[in-house]
Image: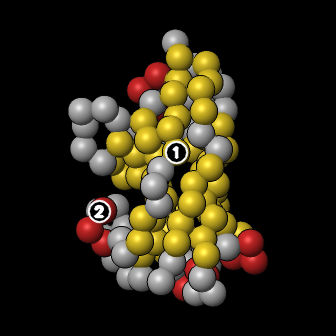
Amino acid sequence: QVQLVESGGGLVQAGGSLKLSCAASGRTFSSYHMGWFRQAPGKERAFVASISWRGGSTYYADSVKGRFTIFRDNAKNTVYLQMNSLKPEDTAVYCCAAAGSYYGLGSPPSYDYWGQGTQVAVSS
């Protein structure tokens, strides 16, 4: 069992930055691949980024490549999402998730555990 708690969301102007954190409880965090998803009002949940259990492999949605960075600290049981050059279209609830399998990390059904999410709002 893994419990996930996100933090770091807030309101920021376009062009600004935010760093999201996802703290995991449980002693098996380092064995899970992790992902960030977001859901804007009226839209489906969308993949943002994923990272393998050791951090050696990362993947990003085209819409955030070059602006967002996912990284993890297994000693702190935490995965992060550094978001730079934010745009109004990045406004959404951001959730982290944990997956036991490496395959299909871009798809929500591949994940076993989810956090409640943190709101990010970007003003123009």
Dot 1 corresponds to which residue?
Answer: 118
Outermost residue toward the right? 75
Residue 23 location (% of width, % of height): 63, 64
Secondary element at tag 2: loop
Q: Residues within 10 Å of mark 1 (few under 14, many from 20)?
A: many
Residue 32 location (% of width, % of height): 51, 79
Q: Residues within 10 Å of mark 2 (few under 14, many from 20)?
A: few
| Residue 65 seen by the camera | no
Residue 25 location (% of width, % of height): 61, 76
> Three-letter amino acid code at disc 2?
Ser
Residue 12 vertical placement versus 104 (above, below): above
Residue name at image x 42 percent, y 65 percent: 114
Determine the CA span between mark 1 and mark 2: 20 Å
Say whether residue 99 is left or right of residue 5: left
Say whether residue 72 is left or right of residue 52: right
Dot 2 corresponds to which residue?
Answer: 107
Residue in the foreground of this view, choosing between 104 and 13: 13
